[in-house]
Structure formats: structure tokens, C-alpha cells
Image (spheres, rainbow, N blue to C red):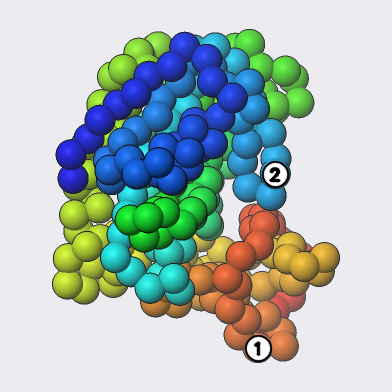
Amino acid sequence: MDITLLTYDIIDSTNTEALKQARLGADEGLCIVARQQTAGRGRQGRVWVSKKDAGLYFSIILRPKIETKSLPLITLMTGVAVYDTLREFGIEPDIKWVNDIHVNEKKISGILAETTETDKGTAVVVGIGINIRTSNYPPEVAAIATSIENETESIISLEELAERLVKFISYFYVLFNEKDGHETIVKEWEKRSTYFSGKHVSVAQNGQTLTGITDGLEANGALRIKTNEGLVVIQAGEVTQLRAEGLNFSV
């Protein structure tokens, strides 16, 4: 995959621009990078705080030849790439299913994958936000977020962070597209996430909440949860870690 970076000082949303470029016929590997977003967004329409030079705001166009049911694995693959990127800076992260990267239970990165139909077939745009600094975040965000600056007491450049990230995305995307690549990505994710198995969690989806213990992933990346009523497979939802104390599961 050939990588091309288009860098903007300010943009509404790197994902929005990447989706537009994909529909215009942009090749796989085009990356939109911004120093600031005015309308950054996360999952479920949430706002992604995108102050100037406070983070890496990055979106890449991919054109994988896979079945629709396997598209969630792209998010898992990206989480693995972000994890390894942060490790290069001496950080010990954890991947929270399905699209957040945490350090000591505080969010340092988020992933948003979106699809669009184009003349070249389905394109997947993967947006990645990584906090470089949180010193100028509002208090309500700083309480639940962390950054490379907080964790390492040093500042890295956006360019260096983007270079490392592209390296790992390219590497794992090659693995993803190989024979048995999907199984490989699930195994790599398992190594990097405490949420893979044995984690007490609550899951909010479709206006309902269930609690249980994580029990691995399905082949398409869905999360299995053991509950008192039996095994439940979660295709999408908001997962929150629970304290083990006081929980009573008979599964």
C-alpha cells in the first residue's frame, strides 16, 4: 500500500474529508492529517475535542476486499497498530473493546471507522485520534483522558507520531490481507487487551444494559459476554469495566 499524507492546519473533520476523497476516487493509502479539527467526531455522534496541536487527528482510506460482516476487524487491526505505536514511546496501553485505547483506565486514543460506496467499490475510512497533550483540555475531559505528554513527561511532534502510526498500520494491514489474516489480527488483539477474557463489564446497547464477564471474540471481532442468562454476543455497544467486588455471576 502506497501512503500519501495530506496535512491541513485546520479542517472540519479528517474523516469527512477522507470520505469525500474516497468517493472522488482516491487510492487506498491516502491519509488526511490535521493540526486542528472544528467538527471532530467519535462514535455515536460524540464530539472529539480537537484543539490545535493537542493531538494527532488522522484518517486513512482503505479498500479491503472482504465481506461486510468482517469489516469490524478493521477497527481491531487499527487498535493493534495504535497500541504498538504508543509502546514505541514507552507507554503501556490497553485496548478497550472495540475502539478505545486506554492507559491506566484513561482514554488516550479513539478510533472511528466509516464506510462509503465509491466507483471503485466499498471504501473504509479509519479515523484515529491520539492525545499528544491534555494540558489545555477542559476539566471534564482531563478527568477521563490522558496523553503522551502526561504519560512520558515529554512532547513529540505530530509528524513523528504520524510516521510511527503509518508504519504499524501498513504492517498490520499486510497481515490482515494475508491468508488466515483475520485470525491473526484477533490473536494479536488478544495479546494486547485485558478486555479479551475475564473482564467484568457492563454493556449498553439499544437502550438496555447487561453485565457479565468477557469470554473472547467471535471470528468477526464481536465480543462474547458470559451472563447469568448464558452467552451473549455483542456486535456493537458501549463497554464499561466494572469492579469485581460485589459481583455475583454463576456462569
Amino acid of disc 2: Gly
Q: Is residue 29 left or right of residue 24?
A: left
Task: Say above or below: 127 vs 69.
Answer: above
- Residue position for label 2: 45
What crowding class fits label 2: few (fewer than 14 Cα within 10 Å), some (14-19), or many (20 or more)? few
Say which quarter of the image contains residue 68. bottom left
Q: Nearer the viewer, mark 2 or mark 1?
A: 2
At 74% from the left and 75% from the top, the residue drawn is 248
Q: Secondary structure at mark 1?
A: strand
- Residue position for label 1: 230
Residue nearest the viewer, comparing 98 with 7: 7
Whether residue 62 is visible here, answered yes or no, is: yes
Q: Is residue 232 left or right of residue 108?
A: right
Task: Say above or below: 54 vs 106.
Answer: above
Q: Position of residue 167 (x, y in %)?
A: 22, 36
Proximity of marks 2 and 1: CB atoms separated by less than 8 Å? no
Task: Say above or below: 162 vs 107.
Answer: above
At 56% from the left and 30% from the top, the residue drawn is 13
At 23% from the left and 67% from the top, the residue drawn is 181
Whether residue 128 is visible here, answered yes or no, is: no
Q: Secondary structure at mark 2?
A: helix
* Number of numbered tags placed on the structure image: 2
Say which quarter of the image contains residue 145. top right
At 40% from the left and 41% from the top, the residue drawn is 24
